[in-house]
Amino acid sequence: MDRFVKNFIVMSIVYLVLAAFFGIVMLANPSYLYLKFVHSHLNMLGWVSMMIYGVGYHILPRFAGKRLKSVKMGEVQFYLANAGLIGMLLSYTMQTSMPEVTLYKGLSVAFGLMEVLSIILFFYNMLATFFSKEE
């Protein structure tokens, strides 16, 4: 198993624990419900997407009987996806705490676009793998 694949899976589990923690915090004290964006994105982009990326990179090329088109692209995607998620969650939280500071909204959008770019890299890497002429 490639190192970046293991990294995706490990981070997925870390995000699951963090999402569960934030869920319990909100349940115990509803004044923290402003963290629902953080909780839901840790679950979906953290836990679910990172696990899909890791398992997908490991299994899907094997199912297709092909080699992954670009391990390097997968590694870049790992760092983009994690930086995008963490940056988006931090900047969004700051934006909700200090809505008058417009910098945080711009940062939230920029980190969100970083996340979208990582998704596009996965999309491209998978399609390029499936449609490659190499076996």
Image (cartoon, helix red, strand yellow):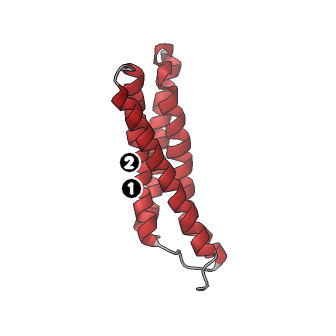
Crowding around mark 2 (Cα neighbors within 10 Å: few <14, some 14 to 19, many 20+) is some
Q: Nearer the viewer, residue 110 or 94?
A: 110
Number of residue marks: 2
Say which quarter of the image contains residue 87. Answer: top left
Placement of 69 over or under 10, stated as above or below = below
Placement of 88 over or under 102, stated as above or below = below
Return the x and y of residue 73 as percentages of the image width and height: 44, 67
Residue occupying image coordinates x 41% and y 64%:
75
Return the x and y of residue 52 as percentages of the image width and height: 57, 55
Which residue matches tag 1?
79
Q: Are marks 1 and 2 in contact (CB under 8 Å)?
A: yes
Say which quarter of the image contains residue 61. Answer: bottom right
Residue occupying image coordinates x 50% and y 25%:
24
Return the x and y of residue 111 as percentages of the image width and height: 42, 43
SS category of the residue bearing label 1: helix
- Quadrant, the C terminus: bottom right
Return the x and y of residue 39 as percentages of the image width and height: 50, 32
Residue occupying image coordinates x 41% and y 53%:
80
Q: CA distance from mark 1 to mark 2?
A: 6 Å
Residue occupying image coordinates x 44% and y 51%:
81
Q: Nearer the viewer, residue 114 or 134?
A: 114
In the picture provided, is 94 more to the left or to the right than 19?
left
In the picture provided, is 129 more to the left or to the right than 108?
right
SS category of the residue bearing label 2: helix
Which residue matches tag 2?
83
The amino acid at mark 2 is Ala
Say which quarter of the image contains residue 62. Answer: bottom right
The amino acid at mark 1 is Tyr
Q: Nearer the viewer, residue 103 or 92?
A: 103
